[in-house]
Amino acid sequence: MDALSDEMLLAALGSGDAEAAAAFVRRFQSRVYGLALTILRDTGLAEEVAQETFVRAWRHASTYDPRRGRVPTWLLTITRNLAIDRTRVRSPTPVDPGALASELELARADQPVDVPERDRLRRALWALPDDQRRAVVLATYAGRTALEISELDGVPLGTVKTRIRAAMLKLRESLGVEHEL
Amino acid sequence: MSCERTRELAPELALGLLDGEQRAQALRHLADCPDCRREVAQLAAVADELLMLAPEREPPAGFESRVLARLQPPPALARPRRRVRRVLAPLAAAAAAAAVAFGVVLQTTSDDRRLADHYRATLAAGHGSSFEAARLRAPGAVPAGVVYAYRGTTSWMFVVVYRDHVGVPYRAELVTKSGRRVALRAFRLDRRTGTGGEAIPVDLDAVASVRLIGRKPGDVLEADLAHAR
């Protein structure tokens, strides 16, 4: 099971195979829990969201479409959306994006086997002007829209949109290659 | 919506920040504009990668067993299998299951979100032991689709090609590990959806790769099944 590709493991999970389910959870649990904890900063809530992520993945394994992204990113998108829903219930004010960004920076030390592409993206994120990084981190990790960010920071909507756009284009440049899918 | 306006909104669309009418308008434009679609896909890939920057953290002890306790298959999946086994002799059951499996494949329509549901049901119906997926690649290793190979009493494969290859009248052949080529004469891709299935006339374990051959020279899509295992 551990030798199966992510896609095959997900397919096996969808077919109701108990062994595949265990292997799938083991393979992705630290990623899923790590993202949930990054967004929620509460171990209890992060576990709830991480559990729910796997339940959804299991339930929707059959609707996974490899054209729309790889399995880990598909899974993390589920985690992100669930976690953001929780933060919205808890408080209208998102977590401090500065703290969030530091957390992302910390991740580098944790993961010596990080892929070069990811490392480039991390460096590019840190090379962004502070206001651009703040906008893109709030959008990605707190699910805040441009309008919400503009209200939160007291900046015109157009300015926030421009920051998000400039940031995303620079980050794309850092990845350098056209994505496979 | 114009290309220019769509490009302006592309980063927010990729980050999932748009909703309502703006999102609907942008999506309508994307349906007809491959260039803008590519732009949004690239930015969405950036958004995906951003999530991968979050640090990995080991969940609390017992997490795995708590999750697995929640992943119980619905009882409906098991029931029909037992009934079929009781009613029919094993050989006839296998043949019937293969027929069911095949019918499901051939009826598959354009809605590829439902597609996987079909083969999951098929696995249950056909007592399948496993199935495998391998990426189809065009020359230059460009992703061109996916081959799903199903191992059962009758093994078969199901093919999905991506948009750029939809409508091409590909013929299919298997290449065995000993280098033998086996043409799949009945194989057809649906011209509209780019999907199609066909029984595999040799032992699945002996198959090294699947090749789809187009009309134009060099238009060959290949999936490496040997290394997908």
Image (cartoon, coloured by chain):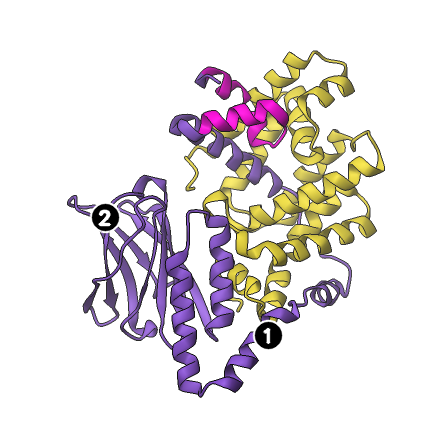
x, y percentage for residue A44?
Answer: 82, 52
Q: Which chain is yellow?
A: A
The residue indicated by pointer 2 is: B169
x, y percentage for residue B191?
Answer: 30, 46
In whole angstroms, how far apart are the C-alphas of marks 1 and 2? 39 Å
Q: Which chain is purple?
A: B
Question: Which of the 4 image quadrants contains residue B106?
Answer: bottom left
Q: Provide the major secondary structure of the magenta segment.
A: helix
The residue indicated by pointer 1 is: B78
Residue at 42% in and 62% down:
B104
Q: Looking at the image, which is closer to me, B53 or A109? A: B53
Does the magenta run of residues contain B207? no
Earlier-in-chain disc, 1 versus 2:
1
Q: Looking at the image, which is closer to me, B27 or A67? A: B27
x, y percentage for residue A75?
Answer: 60, 49
Residue at 30% in and 43% down:
B165
Q: Looking at the image, which is closer to me, A142 or B166? A: B166
Q: Amino acid at mark 2?
A: Pro
Residue at the front extreme, as displayed: B87
Does the magenta run of residues contain B29? yes
Q: Looking at the image, which is closer to me, A155 or A97? A: A155
- Whether residue B57 is visible, yes or no, is no
Q: Which type of secondary structure does the marked residue at label 1 adopt?
A: loop
The magenta stretch is B4-30
Residue at 57% in and 70% down:
A17
